[in-house]
């Protein structure tokens, strides 16, 4: 998979490239709008990550010109401008996703993967992490063959963790996915629900599956617990 | 109408001045007229005395006293013309006395006799009855035969009094009427002149920090009021500018903080996820990440508040049921309360429709309920209520927690204000939650109030306008 990152802030592009490379993506980086457009029009990328405030050609203009030529390539807009009007404007211009700074890298990664997956509907009905398995059709949860009863929100949280098994999800991502933005901020609702979930799926068993990554968030599965 | 308004005071002043002047005028007219009428009467009396003397009394030596008396009775007829006539000889004996007049104004016999032989003309007043006086003019007269007499002619002053009485009556009725007309006229005139002031006041009342772009109406009259409204408008423009400046600063600062925060977070995350680091370093990186996260939240909140202040709040307007939103949101937060051993009660059965941004109003509910749970100890109670009263939608969140000390109450909606600095920081707040609540509610045309007793609990009340019936 080959991605194009158009971002003028060198340090930002450095950690994005580092993280994406670790996930086995090939990433081209340019810091200039004109040069970015040139590359986007020359090569066939699987995804473009576009900053809006760029020297030379602005990100908005670059998006417009890219879309004129290529309808298909997914574009993820990355910006410090989070006014609703800005979002609406860029979605109308053909952006596929919009992420405001500061963001967790994990969130960028999840979104990039979601955009690349799009179209190919390969949603497995059964998700499995070690001996824990959930059935998305019946919303049934079993661990070691033993049936576990979860509430609606607990199930939502577990399903989100399991679709991104092995990846650390930030509290903000979990809140926006399982609840909605209104809960973002001071509430510790995620921590409370994770604790309840652990009570049910981890406490009765010797091997703990849900892990906390301090300062980042939560993950299920992954190297450390396997 | 207040007694302190300019309109009232000016009207009262003018009316008082006018009444005073009219009373003064009435008095001078009365005095002047009295003088004139008395002078006229005296002239008439002296004229008549002279006539009596020259026409008849001069020849008394030839014609005889009884003839003179007859002539006076017949030609001058004091009985008919209501005059008093008396002729007294030099020895004090009365030669002639007129009869009682037809109008019975006075009794001639009761007029006091002449005390001494007058040697010059004089005028005196005789008090005959309680309410009338007789003006008597006395004139010495020498007949052709050398006999000396005093001729007295008198008339009642009743007519003068009557005329003056009529005048006073006219003034007494006319004056209040004139003052009343002046008050009404003056009041209307003042109201017309001051109506622009009322308009300016009303418009000025409508202007708050949220609609500083509005201006007062300016009447192009070229008078003091135009200058007043132009001056006020300039002041509002300056306020507007400084408010925008503060807002822009807030937004710019938050914006500029984002890129460094992104880098900080990205680098720390990348470092924390490396496998070969020591647990101590992992702890340190985790702690740094937590602080970065908090910093990001503060920046987000500041940005949100400055955007709300700039009036961008109601982007996604919708009609919805506040009661339904409240009960579903409270339900989602139930676990938070149960986790702390707090009972969470929600009374929102009846539909209360409001118009606004659903997500933002949900944030209001979340922030208030979350606050209540945070500041209520285990075993406590948090209550949430929604109802419609007097055309306003009311959302109430109460608790029996730690409460807010009275000196802190006026400040709790201010940015970065914390009641108990140590404790709230421990809970991860930044002192912006209630500022956001206030900014959202104000942007929706509502208001938020708080009551609290320290140690007993707090009660937050949000009031919003109810959505219009037409669009339901």
Image (tube, rainbow, N blue to C red):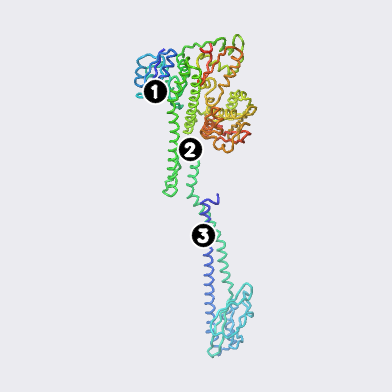
> Is disc 1 surrounded by few (<14), some (14 to 19) or many (20+) residues within 10 Å?
some
* Chain at numbered mark 1: A
Number of marks drawn: 3
At a point 57% along the width and 66% down the height, the residue shown is B166
Q: Is residue B441 visible?
A: no
Residue A206, x across and y down, in percent = 59, 12
Quarter that holds the C terminus of chain B: top right
Which of label 1 and label 2 is nearer to you?
Answer: 1
**Mark-to-mark CA distance, 1 and 3:** 82 Å
* Front in this rendered view, residue A179 or B73: A179
Q: Does the residue at mark 3 contact the one at mark 2 (Cβ under 8 Å)?
A: no
For this view, does B240 lie left or right of residue B344? left
The secondary structure type at the circle numbered 2 is: loop
Q: Which residue is mark 2?
A: B209
**Mark-to-mark CA distance, 1 and 2:** 37 Å
Q: Compared to B385, does B176 lie above or below?
A: below
Q: Is residue B130 visible?
A: yes
Q: Which mark is residue B1?
A: none
The secondary structure type at the circle numbered 1 is: loop
Q: Which residue is mark 1?
A: A9
Residue A224, x across and y down, in percent = 52, 13
Residue B436, x across and y down, in percent = 52, 31
Q: Are marks 1 and 2 on the same chain?
A: no
The secondary structure type at the circle numbered 3 is: helix
* Chain at numbered mark 3: B
* Chain at numbered mark 2: B
Q: Does the residue at mark 1 contact the one at mark 2 (Cβ under 8 Å)?
A: no
Q: Which residue is mark 3?
A: B18
């Amino acid at each position: 998979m080959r991605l194009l990152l158009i971002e003028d802030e060198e340090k930002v592009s450095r950690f994005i490239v580092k993280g994406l490379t670790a996930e086995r993506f090939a990433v081209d980086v340019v810091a200039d709008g004109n040069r970015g457009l040139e590359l986007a029009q020359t090569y066939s990328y699987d995804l473009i990550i576009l900053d809006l405030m760029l020297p030379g050609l602005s990100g908005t203009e670059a998006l417009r010109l890219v879309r004129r030529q290529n309808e298909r390539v997914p574009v993820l807009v990355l910006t410090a401008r989070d006014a609703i009007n800005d979002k609406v404007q860029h979605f109308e211009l053909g952006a596929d996703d919009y992420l405001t700074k500061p963001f967790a890298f994990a969130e960028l990664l999840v979104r990039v993967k979601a955009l690349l997956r799009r179209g190919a509907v390969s949603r497995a009905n059964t998700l499995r992490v070690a001996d824990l398995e959930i059935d998305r059709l019946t919303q049934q949860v079993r661990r070691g063959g033993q049936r576990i009863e979860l509430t609606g929100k607990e199930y939502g949280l577990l399903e989100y963790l399991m679709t991104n098994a092995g990846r650390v999800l930030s509290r903000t991502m979990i809140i926006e996915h399982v609840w909605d933005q209104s809960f973002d901020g001071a509430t510790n609702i995620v921590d409370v629900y994770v604790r309840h979930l652990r009570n049910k799926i981890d406490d009765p068993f010797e091997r703990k599956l849900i892990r906390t990554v301090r300062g980042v968030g939560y993950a299920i599965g992954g190297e450390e617990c396997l | 109408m207040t007694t302190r308004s300019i309109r009232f005071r000016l009207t009262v002043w003018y009316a008082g001045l006018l009444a005073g002047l009219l009373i003064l005028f009435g008095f001078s007219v009365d005095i002047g007229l009295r003088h004139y009428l008395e002078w006229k009467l005296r002239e008439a009396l002296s004229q008549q005395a002279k006539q009596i003397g020259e026409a008849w009394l001069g020849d008394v030596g030839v014609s005889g006293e009884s003839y003179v008396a007859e002539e006076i009775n017949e030609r001058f007829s004091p009985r008919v013309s209501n005059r008093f006539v008396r002729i007294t000889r030099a020895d004090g004996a009365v030669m002639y006395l007129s009869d009682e007049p037809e109008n019975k104004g006075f009794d001639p016999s009761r007029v006091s006799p002449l005390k001494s032989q007058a040697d010059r003309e004089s005028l005196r007043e005789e008090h005959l009855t309680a309410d009338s006086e007789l003006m008597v003019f006395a004139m010495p007269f020498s007949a052709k035969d050398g006999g000396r007499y005093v001729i007295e002619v008198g008339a009642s002053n009743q007519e003068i009094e009557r005329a003056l009485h009529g005048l006073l009556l006219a003034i007494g009725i006319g004056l209040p009427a004139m003052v009343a007309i002046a008050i009404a006229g003056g009041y209307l005139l003042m109201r017309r002149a001051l109506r622009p002031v009322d308009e300016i006041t009303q418009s000025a009342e409508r202007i708050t920090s949220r609609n500083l772009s509005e201006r007062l109406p300016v009447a192009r009259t070229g008078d003091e009021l135009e200058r007043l409204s132009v001056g006020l408008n300039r002041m509002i423009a300056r306020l507007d500018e400084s408010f925008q400046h503060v807002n822009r600063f807030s937004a710019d600062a938050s914006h500029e903080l984002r890129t460094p925060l992104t880098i900080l977070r990205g680098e720390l995350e990348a470092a924390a996820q490396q496998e070969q680091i020591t647990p101590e370093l992992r702890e340190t990186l985790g702690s740094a990440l937590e602080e970065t996260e908090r910093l990001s939240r503060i920046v987000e909140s500041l940005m949100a508040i400055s955007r709300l202040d700039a009036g961008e709040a109601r982007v996604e307007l919708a009609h919805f049921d506040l009661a339904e939103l409240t009960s579903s949101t409270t339900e989602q937060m139930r676990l938070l309360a149960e986790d702390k051993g707090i009972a969470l009660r929600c009374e929102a059965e009846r539909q209360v429709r409001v118009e606004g941004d659903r997500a933002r109003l949900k944030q209001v509910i979340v922030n208030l309920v979350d606050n209540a749970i945070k500041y209520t100890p285990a075993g406590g109670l948090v209550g949430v209520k929604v109802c419609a009263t007097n055309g306003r939608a009311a959302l109430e969140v109460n608790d029996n927690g730690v409460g807010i000390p009275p000196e802190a109450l006026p400040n709790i909606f201010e940015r970065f204000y914390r009641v108990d600095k140590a404790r709230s920081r421990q809970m991860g707040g930044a002192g912006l939650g209630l500022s956001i609540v206030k900014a959202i509610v104000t942007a929706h045309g509502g208001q938020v109030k708080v009551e609290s007793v320290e140690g007993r609990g707090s009660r937050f009340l949000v009031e919003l306008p109810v959505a219009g019936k037409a669009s339901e």
